[in-house]
Amino acid sequence: MHLQLQAFLVLAAALFAIGIYGLITSRNAVRVLMSIELLLNAVNLNLMSFSNYIDAQGIKGQVFAVFVITVAAAEAAVGLAIVLSIYRNRDTVDMEQFNLLKW
Amino acid sequence: MNLAEGVQIVSFCILSLMMIGAALGVVLFENIVYSAFLLGGVFISIAGLYILLNADFVATAQVLIYVGAVNVLILFAIMLVNKREDFKPLPNRLLRQVTTGLVCFGIFALLSTMVLATPWAFSTAPAAAESSIVIIGEHLFSDFLLPFELASVLLLMAMVGAIVLARREYIPDEILPGLTRPSGLTLPERPRELLTLTSGGKGDLRNQKPASSTKQPIDTNA
C-alpha cells in the first residue's frame, strides 16, 4: 500500500473546508486573516502533492508554492495593516461592524 | 509493505491528525491567542507533510516564512488590537454556524468525490536525482524569471503599503509660534485626532479627548 496522491488531496480539501468555515463564521478580523492563511496553505499542499506525484522530474509545483508563500506573506502584512487601521478608526475588531461600504 | 512505507504512512497519519486538529482549534477556539499558536502548529505539520513529499526546500521556507514571519506578525497584531470586547450577539447565530458548517461539509464532500473519482495521470518517471534546491533555482532563473522579479516588486509594494496603512496620519495644524517644524530625518507625524470622527454618530469611541490635549499619543490599549 503506497501513500497515494488522493490522501494528500483529501487532506487539503479538509483544510480548505475548515478555512472557509472560519472565514465565514468568525467575527474577529484577525481570525479571518488566519483563516485566509489556512486556505492558502491548503492550496499549497495541493500544489506540492501534484508536483511530487505528477511532475516529479521538473518540480514546477514547488516553484508555484514558493510564489504562493511570497504572496501570502505580502497579504498577511497588508491585511494586518488594514485591520490595525480599521481598529484605530472604529475601535473594534468586530467584522459585523465593518459595514462602512455596505450599501 | 516494507519499513519505509510503514514509516511514511504512520507519519502521514500523525501529521494529518495534528494538522486537522490544530486547524479546527484555530477556527473554533474562543480565545484568539490560542488560535494564533495553533496556527503555528498547522504550519509546522504542513512543513512535515512537505518533507513527506520530497520537498525539503519548500518545507524549510514554510517554517521560516510562515512560522517565523507570518505567525509572529499575527501575534503582534493580536497584541496591538488586544481589547477584550464582548461582541454583540447576533440573531440566529447558531443557525448561521450550522448552515455554514453544512455548506463547508458539502464543499469537502464534493472535492473528495472529485479527487477520488478522477483518474490521475501519474508520472512513471522516477524522482529527480539532483536536489530540489538546484531544480528550483534553475526554474527561478530560467523560465520563471519574470514572476520571480514580479514577486520582488510585489513584496516592495506590500511593504510600502503596509507602512502607509499602519502609520498614523499626519494632520498639519496651525504652526504654533514657539514650535519649529521638525526637519531632517524625523518623521513628521502625530496621533490622529479622534475627535473629528465623533460627528458621524456611528463610531463608538471611548476616549474622547478635547482638542487641546491631542499632543500626547492616545493609548489605544487603555
Image: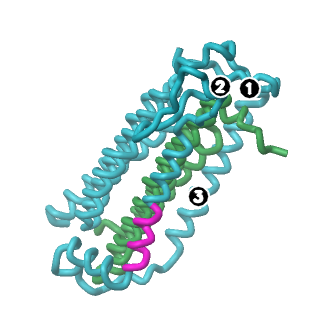
Q: Position of residue B209 (x, y in %)?
A: 66, 13
Q: In the rendered image, is residue A14 in sight? A: no
Nearer to me, A102 or B172: B172
Residue B108: x %, y % from top left: 57, 56
Display colour scheme: by chain
* Residue B192 relative to residue B124: left or right: right
**In which quarter of the view is residue A53 placed?**
bottom left
Mark found first going from the N terminus, 3 or 1 = 3
Q: Main secondary structure of the magenta part?
A: helix
Looking at the image, which residue sits at the far front?
B177
Task: Tell me which chain the residue with mark 1 is part of.
Answer: B
Closer to the camera, A99 or B153? B153
Query: Which label lies toward us, 3 or 2?
Result: 2
Query: Which residue has dot 1 on it?
Result: B196
Task: Give the CA distance from mark 3 to mark 2.
Answer: 51 Å
Residue B143 is situated, as x and y percent measured from the top left of the image, at 37, 84
Whether labels 1 and 2 belong to a single chain: the reply is yes
Task: Identify which amino acid the numbered label 1 is placed on.
Answer: Thr
Among the chains pictured, the one given cyan colouring is: B
Q: For residue B203, what is the image quadrant? A: top right
Given the image, what chain letter belongs to the residue carrying mark 2?
Answer: B
